[in-house]
Image (cartoon, rainbow, N blue to C red):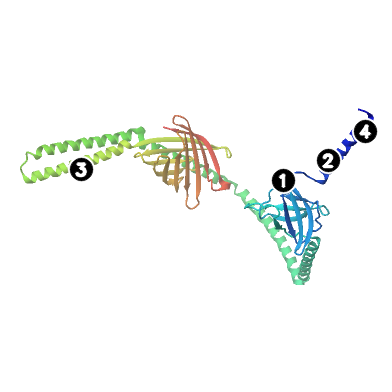
Amino acid sequence: MNTEAKVGAITLSGLILLAGMFVYLSGISFGDKGYPIKAVFAQVSGLKPGNIVRYAGVEIGKVTDVLVLPDGVSADIMLNPGVKIPVGSTLTIGSDGLLGEKFINIMPPREIKGFLAPHDKVYGDNPQGLDELMVSANQVLAEVKTLVKALNDVLADEKVRAALKESALNTRDITVNLNRLTATLALLAEHNQGDVTTMVANLKAMSGSLKDTAARVDKMIANVDNNGQTAKELRETITALKQTSSRVEKMAAALEGVVTDTETAKNIKETLKNARDATANANKMLNKVADIKTDANVEALYNTDTRKYKSNADVSISTSSSDFTVIGVSDIGEDSKLNLQLGKRGPVFNQRFGIIDSKAGVGVDAKLSNQLRMSLDVYDPNDVRVKLRTQYQVAPDTFIVGQSEDMNKRDEITTYFGVRRSF
């Protein structure tokens, strides 16, 4: 390649590069150019062709032309390809800084019900111009001036100044009296330290009594069941009653065909009827006793925030496949609370009502899986409280327990974790 060809190639490359930079900087595009829309404003505050258009703060197009109309000013907008403006969008004119370049800002509506079509006309909100700001500032200054004049009129009154001075003096006297009261209370506490110590000792003794009471209640519950012996003896008694009634019925039936005396026969029939009734009642009682099952449970819980332990104990007595009773004591030794509830079993949920933590309430137990169970208690009608329990079986008759109390009181929520054991 000779020198002239090299110079021509370099010159042509420079012209192509210059044309590309011109096209890039001028925003000229080829092919799909998006779609145009027309925005109409009462005034545009210096908006001119070439200003950018933003959608929720993102640049999406430019202003191609600004025309004066009889009812305002029209700004032709060319949106970038692929951009869609929802119907009902708000158009305003803003600026980058106090003296920055103007731009059109588009804010989408809360609910989108369609999009603008090419060449649609939309009406924008009027911008707040400098004149409007000056008028608003003048109105504010006038109101401030009126307020200052009113304060001067009030403070110029001798009676008002005297009242303010008297109020300040009264405040000083109140402060002095409060200081004296504080000193008196401190002295009183110092002189009655012995009484306070005695009161604390009495509270400790009372706590010990409550602990002994809880132990006796626990022992009483154990004695009621007596390791299943009570239920066993009751079944044996009812069985004996059933056998005796059957023997009486057989004896009366044997005599019925032999005795000819009318009164005697009547008595035998009455005996047969009574024996049958006794046998039927014994069968009912025996069936009920056969369904009675007792489960004793003990648990120890720990609060990581207060670092305190609490222990609970209860006995569940099942009188049938669907009916059960819960008797127990919670927070043994500290603030012992009685639990006495009647319940109904279901396939997934158990329902309870009665006394929960010494207050009237209701509860629901949910069996989420073979190992996982969840309970929700709502009690104390005068000051409603909600308790949520979750227990997960980790071994036979052994559960990990999580319990949150007072869940409806944000500042009083307490959470415990611990172990529950069934016997």
Q: Which residue is mark 1?
A: 81
Residue neighbourhood size for the residue with mark 4, other residues' Cα within 10 Å, grouped as few (<14), some (14–19), many (≥20): few
Looking at this view, name the residue that lies furthest to the right: 3
351, above or below 233, in the image: below
Which of the marked residues, 2 or 4, is nearer the chain's N terminus? 4
Look at label 4 and name its amino acid.
Answer: Val
Pointers 1 and 3 in contact (C-beta within 8 Å): no
In the foreground, 87 or 128: 87
Q: Tell me the CA gap for discs 2 and 1.
A: 21 Å
Label for residue 277?
A: 3
Tell me the amino acid under the disc marked 1: Pro
Return the x and y of residue 286 as percentages of the image width and height. Answer: 27, 37
In the image, what residue type sits under mark 3? Asp
Q: Which residue is mark 2?
A: 20
**Measuring 20% from the left and 43% from the top, which residue is drawn there?**
277
> Which badge, 4 or 1, is on the more N-terminal residue?
4
**Disc 4 from disc 1: Cα separation:** 40 Å
Q: Nearer the viewer, mark 1 or mark 3?
A: 1
Viewer-nearest of labels 3 and 4?
4
User: Is residue 334 at least partly visible in the picture?
Assistant: no
Quick one: quadrant of the N terminus? Answer: top right
Give coordinates of residue 171: x percent, y percent.
71, 61
